[in-house]
Every structure is written in C-alpha cells, then in structure tokens.
Image: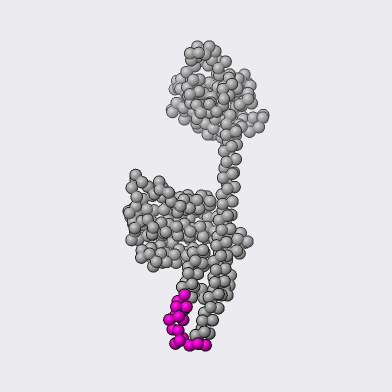
Amino acid sequence: MLPQRHIRETPDHLADLAGDADLTHGATQAPEGFTDLRALVDQLPGFVFRLRHDGGQLRFDFSSACCLPVCGVQASDLQHSAQHLLNQIDPLDLAPFHAALQASVASGFWNWEGRLHTPHGLKWVNVRARTRSINAFAAESTGIMLNVTQSHLRESQLLNLSSDLRQIASHLESVREAERARMARDLHDDLGQVLTALQMDVALLRKQFGAAQAPELFGNVDKLIHAAAEAGRRVASELRPSVLDLGLKAALRWMSAQYAQRYDIRVSTELSYKSEVGELIATELFRIAQEGLTNVVRHARARQAWVRCVDVEAHQICISVEDDGIGYTPQEPPASRPSLGLRGMRERAAVFGGSFQLDQSPRGGVRVQVCMPLGPTLSSDDAGAAQPQPSAGDALG
C-alpha cells in the first residue's frame, strides 16, 4: 500500500488521476505501467469515488474498496444510496459540505474537510476532487477522500501544548514581576535604612568635630550619600516603578516624561482607552512601551515620539510607540536585524495571546504596535506579592 504521507502531499494529483480515468469501466484510460486501474485505486489509503450531483440528488457511480475503512460504509451500500455518507457527516459540517460541492461546479475543484460519525468513532476526512459539468443541471466530481484524523489529533495536541506553554510563560512573567517588586522594595528599605543611618552618623560627626575642621570631607560624604540614594531610587524604579500602583495611564505619562527629560526628546501620549486593565496586563503594556521608547532613543535619531494606548474592540487593548526618526529601508527592515528588544516585545505579546506589528510610521520613522486581549487580573497571591509594602527607609524617598 502507498504511504499515506505521499498521498496527503499530492491529493490534487490523485484527483486529476481519478478524473482522467474511467472509474466506472475499469482501466480504459490507465497510465502507462498500470494494467488495472481498479487494482491501483484499491491500493490507495483513501476512498476514491465518482459522485454525480443532479438537481440536488447525489449518487456514487464508483466507490473504491477503501470506502469501508475511511467512511465505515460498504461500497455497495454507498453506491445504492449516498445518504449512507450524508447521515454520518457532523451536523455542523453538512452545510459546508454541500456549499463546497456546489461551488466546485463553477471552480472545477472540490475541497472540503469535515467530521464523520462512523461506527468506529469520530473521523476527520478531507475531500479533493475535480468537478465537471455534464449539462445545465448535472455535474460529476471525481476524486479521493482521505482520513486525516491523526493530523487533526496532532494539531490539537500542538495547540494544547502551545496553550500550556503560554500559561507557563505567563506564570513565569507574573513571578518575575513579583520578584522585581520584592527586589525594588528590599533595595528601597535596606539601602534606605543604611543611608539614613549614615546621614545621622555624619551629622553627629559634624556636630562633634565641627564642619569647619574638614569642610571638603564632610561635603564629599554628603554628595556620596545623595548619589547612592539617587542610584538606589533609579534602580528600584527600573525594577518596578511605584507609579504603576497608580494605574497604567499614570505610569505611561510618568515614563514618557522621564524619557523626555533624560534624553531631550519630545514624547506625546494618547491614552484614550476606557477598558479596565488588570495589573499583570498593565505591567506588560508598560514594559512594552518602555522597550519601544528605549529603541527610539538608541536607534531612531528621532526628535519626537508618540505613545498611544487605545481600545480597538471589545476586550482588546493596543499600545503603540511611534517616532519621526530615520526609519528603515525596504531592503533592511528592523525585523531583519537581530534585536533583543523587538524579540522581547514579540514574546511578551505572544505569551498573553496578543499580536505584534512592526511597520513604517507615516511620520517617517518606525511604529511598533502590540494588541492584547484583556485577561484576568493577577491571582490574590501574585497581587499581594506585587504590592509595595510600607517603607522604613527615608533616605531613598
């Protein structure tokens, strides 16, 4: 028997073969090297047929021996009445079956895939056939029906695996954000306490020995303490900006102002969405916008950037970062260059079932857009871990 893999790869050729041959009268038009067309088609792992449709009535003029293993119906029964097959088609697939068959009269090719409820269980089958008109009312389709159940099972398993991987990645991302929040909190508290104590000790030394005895030394120590406090605030903010606790809109406005101040670039925001955004999705959208602005600063040579976050349809939100920089040429789009930033944005979108789009901005630069479905908020455990705790350190502010 021919391997099914080869049959699946060339179903159109099989339809052509069956259409060219006179299936109802043996091997009168068999290809060179084959003496018995019926023997040939009976070796195929698919059900070869010739189906006549006349005024809505269906009749099988020919059915190969594989009719039984594929459809669970004897060839003789099927040739007696096509209803044996129609009765097995899933109700949801019956209308598409007839629609595809009717459309094939005009196109000349019938391609349909659906479910059969056979005596041996549910099967997925694929039909490929050539259709020719006989007269104004009748047509004839000759082709093959293949059992593609295993392919659908594998596809379903892959989809389930992909869903499981997305859930794992989503959980890891929530754990990572919770860990960032913990590290930021610990850095704020622990370093803040140390610097506060150091400030108090320096104040005591200044009072005990007098600042006039070593003004430069005390001044340098004060500068170092303030520099350490500023560094601690910056690192804690990069780990998890506390402004996120005020909501996504406040966080995006704050970040845009920070980039504008730090990198001398104008950043405009349009935050017109009205949907309620869960904490985890809000954090992801913030990180995506952050990475987008970082790319603008590093690569775009732009004078202005735009951060836009809007509702696009029910239960979906889109965020985009756009610039008026140098853009890219069709010969070398950004997607063709190795970029951890773009890859990170694409992966963040994929984890939450979103989409990633990179294209040329009408303003001349690049536009990155990510759309995400609005999912549930963090679980109570994750949310608790991500919330900032009261701080004992004053030096970090």
Against 178, residue 97 (above or below) is: above
What x and y, as percent, mark residue 375?
A: 55, 55
Image quarter of residue 38: top right
- Main secondary structure along the magenta-highlighted residues: helix
Against 353, residue 235 (above or below) is: below
Q: Residue at x 58, y 70 (%)?
A: 389
* Magenta span contains residue 350: no
How many discs mark residues in the rendered view? Answer: 0
Q: How is the image coloured?
A: one colour
Q: As rendered, which of 275 and 210 lies closer to the eye? A: 210
Would residue 101 be seen by someone viewing this image from the given angle? Answer: no
What x and y, as percent, mark residue 5?
A: 55, 28
* Magenta span contains residue 216: yes
Q: As rendered, which of 230 and 391 lies closer to the eye? A: 230
What x and y, as percent, mark residue 371?
A: 47, 52
Against 137, residue 193 (above or below) is: below
Q: Is residue 9 left or right of residue 117?
A: left
Residue at the limit of the structure toward the front, as seen here:
213
Against 139, residue 179 (above or below) is: below
Would residue 327 be seen by someone viewing this image from the given angle? Answer: yes
Q: Residue at x 39, y 53 (%)?
A: 367
Residue at the limit of the structure toward the right, as seen here:
119
Residue range (magenta)? 207-224
Q: Is residue 307 left or right of residue 208?
A: left
Q: Residue at x 48, y 24 (%)?
A: 13
Q: Residue at x 51, y 81 (%)?
A: 202
What x and y, as percent, mark residue 374?
A: 53, 55
Q: As rendered, which of 211 and 94 lies closer to the eye? A: 211
Quadrant location of the N terminus in the rendered image: top right
Image quarter of residue 24: top right
